[in-house]
Image (cartoon, grey):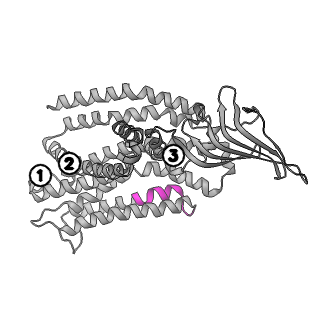
Amino acid sequence: MGRRSVVGATLLLSLLLCVWRLPVEQQQVEEHLRGFPDSDRFLHGLRPYVLAGIFFLPFLSSLWYAASGILSRWLVREFLRAMLVCYGGILLIYFLIDFSGNASRLSEKGELLQSTWFFYSRQAPAIMSLMLPFGILFSVMYCVSRISRSREMVAALQSGRSMMRVMSPLYLCGLLGTLFYAGCNFHWAPMAEGMKGANLDEARGKTGTLMNHAVYYFAKGQRMWMVTEIPRGFDRGVPMKGVEVTSLNADGSLASRLYAKQAVWNEDDRTWKFYDVELSDHHKNQAPVFVSPADPYVISSWQETPAQIVQLGLNVRHLGMPELSGAMKTDMHTQWLERDIARYQTQWHYRMALPASCMVYVIFAIPLSLFVTRRAHGGTMALTIILAIHLVLLTSVALALGESGNISPALAAWSPVAVFAFIGSWLMWRRSSGRALWPLFGK
C-alpha cells in the first residue's frame, strides 16, 4: 500500500469514527450536565473535541510518516513491528488473565460472546491506557536492541547523521503515544476503571451498581444521607436502595430519621419519592414516634440531588479531569478537610503527568538499549526494567505524599516524571557523545 493510500485510509477511518461516536458523546455530556448541574461545563464541553483529537491521531501519524525520509520510515516500521509483538502480547496476556477470572460471571446471562464484547468494549480505554506505557517501553527495547544487534544502527550512523537524528522517529512515536494516553486519561480511562463493577453487572444482565454504602452530609438542610446501593441509572429514574436520611436540629441533636427500601428523584419537578418508608420523630426527653406513611412518600422541599450524593462518594482516582475540576469548584468544598482538597488537586495534576510516562520510558530506554559494539550488554536491559519499576514506585510514594498534603499537588504529580526524564536525557547525552554510560557497562 502506497503512502497516499495509507493517508487516505486513515483519514477515512478518522472521519467514520467521528461520525459514529461524537454525537453519542455530545448526548452523554448533556445528560451528565443535567444530572450534575455543578459540573465544570467548559471541560465537559471539551470532551467531544478531545475525542475527535484521539480519532485523528492515526491520520496525523500517517501524514508525518508520508512526509518522512527513507531512514525514518524504516525505523517507524521496525517500531510498529515491535509494538505489534510487545504491546499486542501484553494486551493478550492481560485479557486472558482477566477473562479467566470473569468468564463464569459473564456466562450467567447465557450469551458469553455478547457479554464479553459488552464488558471489554467498555473497559477498553482503561485497559489500553494502563498497558500503553509498558508496551512502548518493551517495544523500544526490542526495536533498538534488534537494529543494534543486526548492525543496522551502525549503517545508519555511517550515513552521516547523529545518533539523536537517527532515533528522532522513536521520540516522535513516544510523543504520539503520550498524546493518545492524555486523551484517554482526560475522562474515559479513569471513568471506565471506576465503572468496572457496574459494567460487569450489566454484562451479566443485572442493574449496574455504581457504588455501595454512600454517605453524604447536606449542610444547608442538616441532613445526613446513607445509601446502601446506588445504581448506574440513578439520574434516569432507577431507584436507589436502602436509603436512610437523618435530620438534625440546629444544636446538632437528632430531629428525625427516615428509612426507605427505595428512593427515586424526579428531575422534572425536583421531588423525592420514597417507598416502604418508616419515619421516626425524635423530641427531647420523649420517646421517638414511628410512622409508616403510604407509598410513595413524596418530599418536594429537599434541595439535594442524587448527583450530589454520588459526586463525593466516587473514588477520586476514578474521576476524569472534568469531574475533578467540577468537584473542586462546588460550594461543598468548604465542608472538605484540607486533606480531601489535596487529594483532588493531586489527582487533577496526575491526569496530565501520567501520560508523560510514555515519553519518559522512551527517553531512558533508547540509550540503555542502544549499543554499537560487537557485544550487547544485558546489564543495561535489566537496568531499563529496574528504572521503570522505580518510576512506578516513586510515583506511588509521591502521590501518597501529595494526597496527604505533605508536598504540593503539582510537585507530587510531576517530580517523578521530571527526575527520570533528566536521567534519560543525561544517559542519551553520554551515549551520543561516544562516552561510556558508566564503567560497569562500557559503550
Q: Is residue 360 magenta?
A: no
Image x and y of residue 126, in percent: 40, 46
Residue at image point 50% right, 43% down = 321
* Residue 79 numbered tag: 2
- The amino acid at mark 3 is Leu
Instruction: Name the element at disc 2.
Output: helix
Q: Quadrant of the C terminus?
A: bottom left
Image x and y of residue 7, in percent: 22, 30
Is 50 located above or below residue 229 in the figure?
above
Please tell me which residue lies in front, 280 or 219.
280
Q: Nearer the viewer, mark 2 or mark 3?
A: 3
Q: Nearer the viewer, mark 3 or mark 1?
A: 3
Mark 1 neighbour density, 10 Å: few (under 14) some (14–19) many (20 or more): some
* Residue 319 numbered tag: 3
Mark 3 neighbour density, 10 Å: few (under 14) some (14–19) many (20 or more): many
- The amino acid at mark 2 is Phe
Q: How many marks?
A: 3
Residue at image point 27% right, 26% down = 12
The answer to which of marks 1 and 2 sits earlier in the sequence is 2
Please state if 429 lies on the left or on the right of 338 as rendered: left
Q: Give the spatial CA distance, label 2 vs label 3.
A: 33 Å
Magenta region: 405-417
**Does residue 436 appear anywhere in the picture?**
no
Residue at image point 78% right, 39% down = 292
Q: Give the spatial CA distance, label 1 vs label 2.
A: 15 Å
* Residue 156 numbered tag: 1
Q: Nearer the viewer, mark 1 or mark 2?
A: 2
Please state if 106 lies on the left or on the right of 243 as rendered: left
Please state if 91 lies on the left or on the right of 314 as rendered: left
